[in-house]
Image (cartoon, rainbow, N blue to C red):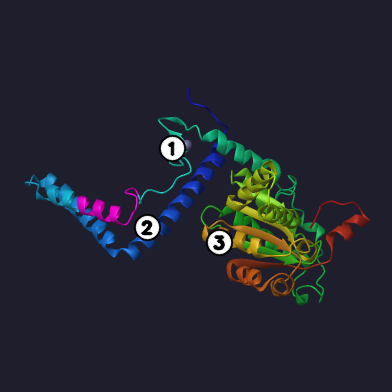
Amino acid sequence: MTRNFDQYTKKRLNRYYEILRQKAERIRDHKVNSIYQAYPEIRELENKKIQAGIAHIRNQISGFVDQKTLELAEIDRELVNILNLHNIPLDYLEPDYNCKICRDRGWINNDYCSCVDRVLMEINQQNNLYLPSPDHTFANFNIDIFSEQKNPVFFQGKLSPREAMRGLRTIAKRYADNFAENPDNLYFFGTTGTGKTFLMSCIANELNKQGVNLVFIKAVKLFELMAQRRTLLNSFSPDPEEQDSVNRRFDLINKTELLCIDDIGLEAKGLLNTYSDLIVLLDDRLNANLPVIMTGNLKPSELAEEYDERIQSRITGNYQLLMLEGPDIRTQTAKGKIEQDAD
Ligand SMILES: [Zn+2]
């Protein structure tokens, strides 16, 4: 009997499989390209094969005696020879899917594939491990807590924090609405208590509702995990269970559809003695076309000084930069009551 899942789970499953497929296909494309580059004769034969195939079909339709079938068989023989000669598997055009049964479709013979249970577990783990505060939503977004006063200290006195926040809210909302077509990278930066985390959480909660698989993690936690992973990697006899758990968590972060890193800043950086792991993570995700949203209290230029020039160049080159300025909402509202956990 076919299993049934609720709409939300279905959406998340579909997205998860889509990303698995895209990743496998991208790796395949890359591999095929380097094969063609090394052995252009293989590409030539593949092209000939396609042309002969088209001619063969055309002949069949018009009822000609089929010379092309012979030609096709001849090309195939040649292709197999040359692939064998270079030790290239005959199915080199086939992506290396995680699940060979359903080819990362999650679905086969009108039923869910057996790999669905493992994928559901991963999705649930993402859910349980890292999600933003559930009440940080666009619906709960109270623009009134931001000051209407223009102040020369903020936005050169040209915008009040409230006006600026209204603009940023529109950008954030649009980002969530257009995520499927245009998943950009964002960096929200500004001083403490200006609402960066709140904005990112709104996006994350909105997308989570739409079924996007995402991870929302504090930079400190991410760096802790990276440091732990590095220690285990360098250790002579790491505890296999711990290593497995750390690797699994890191893997979830690495391949989640949207990664939200909260609060990149001076406090977080102390934990890392190397930024190469973060750079690799950011590069992996850029190459796989998987977006990242970050918040931080460092300007892009300060990222170079405090972190690493390579991190700064990645962010300025590939991220939409969104600045927040204004008085600290938390100290303001703390005078009355805290209405929003603003940062
Ligand atoms: Zn499967």
Residue at 75 percent across and 73 percent down: it is 155
Secondary element at tag 3: helix
Which residue position holds label 3? 286
**Residue type for callout 3:** Leu
Labels 3 and 2: the sequence-earlier one: 2
Q: Secondary structure at mark 2?
A: helix
Residue 90 magenta-highlighted? yes
Magenta residues span 76-91
**CA–CA distance in space, label 1 to label 2:** 22 Å
Q: Is residue 197 magenta?
A: no
State the mark number for residue 32: 2
Depth check, front residue: 156 or 7: 7
Is residue 7 in sight in this rendering?
Answer: no
Q: Answer with left or right where residue 72 lies relative to residue 40.
A: left
Quarter of the figure with residue 165: bottom right
Horizontal side of residue 228 vs 336, given as left or right: left
Judge left or right: residue 342 versus residue 75.
Answer: right
Q: Position of residue 124 (x, y in %)?
A: 64, 38
User: Which labelled disc corresponds to residue 102?
Assistant: 1
Labels 3 & 1 near each other (Cβ < 8 A): no
Identify the mark at residue 131; answer none if there is no mark.
none
- Label 1, secondary structure: give it: loop
Closer to us: mark 1 or mark 2?
A: 2
Q: Between residues 248 and 209, which one lies in front from this camera angle? A: 248
